[in-house]
Amino acid sequence: MPLRFSLRQLEYLVAVGECGSIALASEKVNVSSPSISAAISQLEAEFGLPLFVRKHAHGLSLTQGGKRFMEQARRVLAEAARLNDLANDITGQVRGPLNVGCLLTFAQIVVPHLRRTFCDAYPAVEFHQVESHQAELFEALRNANLDIALTYDLNIPPDLEFVDLVSLPPYAVMSDTHDLAHLESVSPKELADYPMVLLDLPMSADYFLSFFTAIGVKPKIAERTRDMSVMQSLVGNGFGYSIANIRPSSNRAPDGRKLRFVPLTGPVRSMRMGLLTTEGARASLTIRAFIDHCRERVTTDSVPGLQIRQSGTIRDF
């Protein structure tokens, strides 16, 4: 019996099942809502069973049969990906889809150069990029929605493998008119009396606040934001200092205000930037090629889009 459905339709099914709505799935896979809706309807007609319950106010929810169907669809998509990996190994060619996740801060600064140079080196690879938070990256890797992710070594679960690339030390970010902007380095204790603009990202916020907890003080949080650019603009306009491990090549906020990145000292640890995969993922020639590419481009001397601190000096790349 000939198959009258495609892997693409199964991909759309899984996306809708995970997102709970066609609109959100459309954003996730970058395909129009009508195309996804048509694919779901075609699958339901082909197999003769309803996959979703339509709830106009609350999106879609999987039927009991739909849940089982989606799990099998995931397995089919995973096996199809293995066929592509097998073809790559047999031919020795790096090609096919590569789904790369990353934290939003890396997507803005580090990933563009890595992606450009990788795609130039391997034009047969279909590079798909997804920005998300740490916990969501974990889940996407486990569900095989991502092949690999560029992230920090924060709360890495034991079932995932972290490939260390480089250490990124923390900085106090402040306007060039801040009382402490003249210092060569600053401690959490010195910062505690000043207003703080907290970069309030999942897991990262706890990491930043742990610097103060370790010395028994509380920071004066005046503002919270999950956007690095917003944080920089608030800091540049004097609403407080912030803490970040990302030091962009530019020392200016998006609105042009000057920023100072003062090294943080005391009971603080650097975060490690690296690549996260599931166990066994490096058997894929394409994933190995991306890991090797990142290792070549990200070193202790050079990180795309960032300034690197070494022995009291700053190197800009």
Image (cartoon, rainbow, N blue to C red):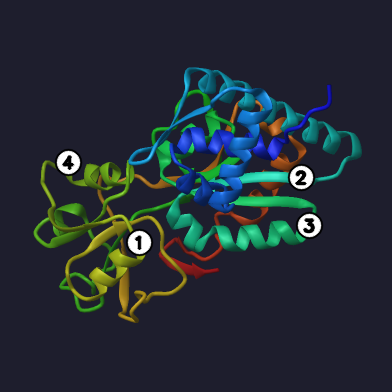
Q: CA distance from mark 1 to mark 3?
A: 31 Å
* Residue farthest toward the bottom in the current orientation of the protein: 256
- Mark linked to residue 123: 3
Query: Mark 2 falls on what kind of element?
Result: strand
**Residue situated in front as seen by the camera: 146 or 74:** 74
- Mark linked to residue 213: 4
Q: CA distance from mark 4 to mark 3?
A: 48 Å
- Mark linked to residue 96: 2
Q: CA distance from mark 3 to mark 2?
A: 10 Å
Query: Mark 3 falls on what kind of element?
Result: loop
245 relative to 211 in the view: left or right? right
Identified by mark 3, the residue type is Pro
Work out whether mark 4 precedes mark 2 in sequence or the reverse, and give the earlier one. Answer: 2
- Mark linked to residue 228: 1
Query: Mark 4 falls on what kind of element?
Result: helix
Residue at (67% x, 53% y) in the render = 296
